């Protein structure tokens, strides 16, 4: 049966502003996502049984029905009217740390949908496609767009922005898995939000003049650092290794630093690894590269 292999890229959040709690229990966000050059390798085979199988080589990533890629495949085949006659065999070679605020599981889910569109030749209308993605998780729809993306609502209502200028980044992870729901709960009860959307609006101004992003930040960072001091240590280590600025991505536990050159980023990775952190130098992936790589 036909098989498609695609990269499943990670994201960072340049900014993440939490505006408040919504009646549905979620938090209203204003965030700017960016796809980056760190990717899992996803292989999807279309099968003639109605079974869906998911396997990964990641120690802390669930196989089978608990993997978000499974729900993505079953949702897609159902909507496409193929669930009785077709199934999928999915294998994910993990590079993106799980539970790290880098959107790994969400990206795998979105990329599974893209792969199945290629394999079945069935392209869902955009409204169905984005509704399916957002039903899987708030961070899934951004991966149907790629590049620099504005996220509002739960973060799942997404709009393509002009690409941010290329940046040399280092992503570092202290080896912690942070639970997103717990982070939002502790944010709500303990911290006073600062000016709504402040960092997002400053970032958008920089984008307008194609200036390098320096106005970055994350309203959830303080709450995560309080419970997990190693996240704060990773941020300090990035700054100590020469980052222009460093901040947490998503609900953590990964942190990101901006560096002035590839060389500076690579030497920072060595310093962070010596201090026991997982670290990678990554470039931003703009929309053209992203859509080209996924055949969107
Ligand atoms: O959408 P996702 O499954 O990634 O969200 C995980 C959890 O994070 C949600 O169940 C919710 O508790 C919290 N969350 C939130 N507000 C958001 C996104 C997520 O409170 N905008």
Image: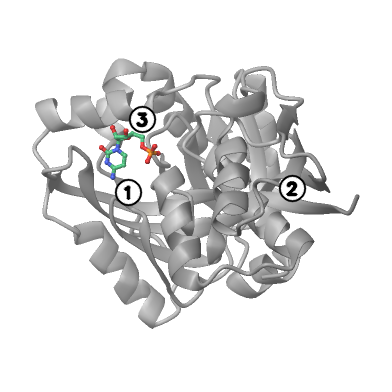
Between residue 195 and residue 56, name the one nearer to us.
56
* Numbered mark located on residue 86 in the image: 2
Q: Which residue is tagged 1?
A: 217
Residue 160: percent from left, percent from top? 45, 73
Which residue is depicted at the point 28% across and 62% down? 200
Question: How far, Cα to Cα, is label 2 from label 3?
Answer: 33 Å
Q: Position of residue 224 (x, y in %)?
A: 31, 26
Residue at 52% over, 72% down: 125
Q: How crowded is mark 2: few (under 14 residues within 10 Å), some or many (20 or more)?
A: some
**Residue 20 rendering spot, x and y as whole percentages:** 13, 45
Q: Quadrant of the C terminus?
A: bottom right
Per the image, label 1 sits on a secondary structure element best described as strand
Q: Earlier in the sequence, mark 1 or mark 2?
A: 2
Vertical relation: 139 (above or below) 260? above
**Front one among 140 and 243:** 140
Determine which residue is flagged by label 3.
180
- Mark nearer the viewer, 1 or 2: 2
């Amino acid at each position: 049966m036909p098989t498609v292999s695609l990269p499943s890229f990670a994201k960072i959040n340049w900014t993440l502003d939490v505006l408040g709690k919504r009646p549905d229990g979620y938090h209203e966000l204003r965030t700017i996502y960016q796809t980056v050059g760190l990717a899992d390798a996803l292989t999807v085979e279309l099968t003639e049984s109605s079974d869906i199988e998911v396997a990964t080589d990641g120690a802390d990533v669930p196989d089978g029905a608990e993997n978000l890629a499974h729900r993505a495949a079953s949702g897609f085949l159902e909507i496409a009217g193929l669930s009785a006659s077709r199934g999928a065999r999915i294998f994910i070679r993990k590079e993106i740390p799980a539970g790290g605020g880098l959107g790994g599981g969400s990206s795998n889910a979105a990329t599974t949908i893209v792969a199945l569109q290629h394999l079945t030749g069935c392209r869902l209308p955009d409204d169905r496609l984005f509704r399916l993605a957002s039903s899987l998780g708030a961070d899934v729809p951004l991966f149907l767009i790629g590049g620099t993306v504005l996220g509002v609502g739960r973060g799942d209502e997404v709009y393509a922005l002009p690409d941010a200028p290329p940046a040399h980044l280092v992503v570092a992870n202290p080896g912690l898995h942070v639970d997103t729901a717990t982070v939002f709960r502790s944010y709500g009860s303990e911290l006073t939000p600062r000016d709504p959307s402040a960092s997002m609006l400053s970032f958008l101004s920089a984008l307008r003049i194609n200036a390098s992003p320096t106005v970055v930040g994350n309203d959830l960072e303080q709450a995560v650092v309080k419970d997990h001091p190693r996240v704060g240590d990773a941020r300090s280590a990035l700054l100590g290794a020469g980052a222009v600025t460093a901040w947490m991505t998503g609900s953590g536990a990964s942190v990101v630093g901006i560096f002035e050159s590839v060389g500076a980023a690579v030497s920072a990775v060595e310093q962070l690894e010596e201090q026991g952190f997982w670290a990678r130098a990554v470039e931003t992936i703009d929309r053209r590269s992203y859509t080209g790589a996924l055949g969107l």
